[in-house]
Image (cartoon, rainbow, N blue to C red):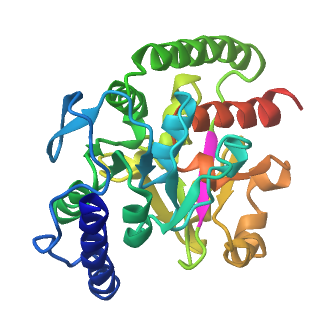
């Protein structure tokens, strides 16, 4: 009875916080939240250090919640199934590469504003995610042990091992990466034999922003191309030299920057109208890559951000369109 009473008191505080949360866009203070966990944690745990502190992680977490699609992908790849996850703010979701593996995973809403009331009711024993603010981290830590994951687009392999260490799946991560590297070596040889030096544009169209962009050497997909010894066009490399972000915006007047031997276009959900503005423009239609029908549409759910499963899905697409045609 006491445990149930404590739980309901905590739920009251969280429900109150949700109202503040939704109005203030993460501008909240966790001080008034009960410090008791919604789900009692076993005394057997491991201390995990991360960018926002350290957390005592259960040795065998059973009810994991993730606050982004990349964490979801990693845990599924490691053979685990979180009980709940958020969906992406803009890009497509991971469903195409997680078919049959995320059935019954509860939707917590968008990554930018997860449903806190649901999280409390689910009583997780571990929360994992990227890009926590210190305030958010303090809040989630009141609900369950929380680990902030380091993530950069080109450092996805390091992230895979970081998450694997948290859930004690390091051997599985090593096997996944070993298989991936073997695949890279095999495909690299095939590309060299059939394509030689090939330049590839990787583009993204947004739903609400009225421009496109090419992804540069700091991006997730281009880092995979470089492993295959493929490259973005020289003009793009020159424009993005010294960049500290993974993309460069491209206006209609500068579509010449997109000229390449092949082009992969990732469309965010609902971005078709934006793409049509470029496609119908005479400058676009003059591109040789367009005239040669070497433009291929791919899923932004795994082409823009991702980890081991997304990387393999990108290799599938590159093989399909560049080698198997």
202 in the magenta segment: yes
Q: Is residue 203 left or right of residue 112?
A: right
Q: Nearer the viewer, residue 70 or 76?
A: 76
Residue 258, placed above or below residue 253: above
Q: Nearer the viewer, residue 265 or 70?
A: 70
Locate residue 106, reporting x and y percent: 57, 58
Q: Residue at x 35, y 45 (%)?
A: 125
Locate residue 131, reporting x and y percent: 30, 55
Occupied quadrant, residue 322: top right
Locate residue 282, reporting x and y percent: 76, 73
Locate residue 8, reporting x and y percent: 31, 71
Q: Is residue 135 left or right of residue 75?
A: left
Q: Residue at x 63, y 55 (%)?
A: 300
Q: Which residues are magenta?
A: 200-205
- The quadrant in which the N terminus is found is bottom left
Viewer can see residue 234: no
Q: Residue at x 70, y 69 (%)?
A: 283
Q: Nearer the viewer, residue 144 or 243?
A: 144
303 in the magenta segment: no
Secondary structure that dominates the magenta span = strand
- The quadrant in which the C terminus is found is top right
Occupied quadrant, residue 54: top left
Q: Is residue 133 left or right of residue 106?
A: left
Residue 267, placed above or below residue 149: below
């Amino acid at each position: 009875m006491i445990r149930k009473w404590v739980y309901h008191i905590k739920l009251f505080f969280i429900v109150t916080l949700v109202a503040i949360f939704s109005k203030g866009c993460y501008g909240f203070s966790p001080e008034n939240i009960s410090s008791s966990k919604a789900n009692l944690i076993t005394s057997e745990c491991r201390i995990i250090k991360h960018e926002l502190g350290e957390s005592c992680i259960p040795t065998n977490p059973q009810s994991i919640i993730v606050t982004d699609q990349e964490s979801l992908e990693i845990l599924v790849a490691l053979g685990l199934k979180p009980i709940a996850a958020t969906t992406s703010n803009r890009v497509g979701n991971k469903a195409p590469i997680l078919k049959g593996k995320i059935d019954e995973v509860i939707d917590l809403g968008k990554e930018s504003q997860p449903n806190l009331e649901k999280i409390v009711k689910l009583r997780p024993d571990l929360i994992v995610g990227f890009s926590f603010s210190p305030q958010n981290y303090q809040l989630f830590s009141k609900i369950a042990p929380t680990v902030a994951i380091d993530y950069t687009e080109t450092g996805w392999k390091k992230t895979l091992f970081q998450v694997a260490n948290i859930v004690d799946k390091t051997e599985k991560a090593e096997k996944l990466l070993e298989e991936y590297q073997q695949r890279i070596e095999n495909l690299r040889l095939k590309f060299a034999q059939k394509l030689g030096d090939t330049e590839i544009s990787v583009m993204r169209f947004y739903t609400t922003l009225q421009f496109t962009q090419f992804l540069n050497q700091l991006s997730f997909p281009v880092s995979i191309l470089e492993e295959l010894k493929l490259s973005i066009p020289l003009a793009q490399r020159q424009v993005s030299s010294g960049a500290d972000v993974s993309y460069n915006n491209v206006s209609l007047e500068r579509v010449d920057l997109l000229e390449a031997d092949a082009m992969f276009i990732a469309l965010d959900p609902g971005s078709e109208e934006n793409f049509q503005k470029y496609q119908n423009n005479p400058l676009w239609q003059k591109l040789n890559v367009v005239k040669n029908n070497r433009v291929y549409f791919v899923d932004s759910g795994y082409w823009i951000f991702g980890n081991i499963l997304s990387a393999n899905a990108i290799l599938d697409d590159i093989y399909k369109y560049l080698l198997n045609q």
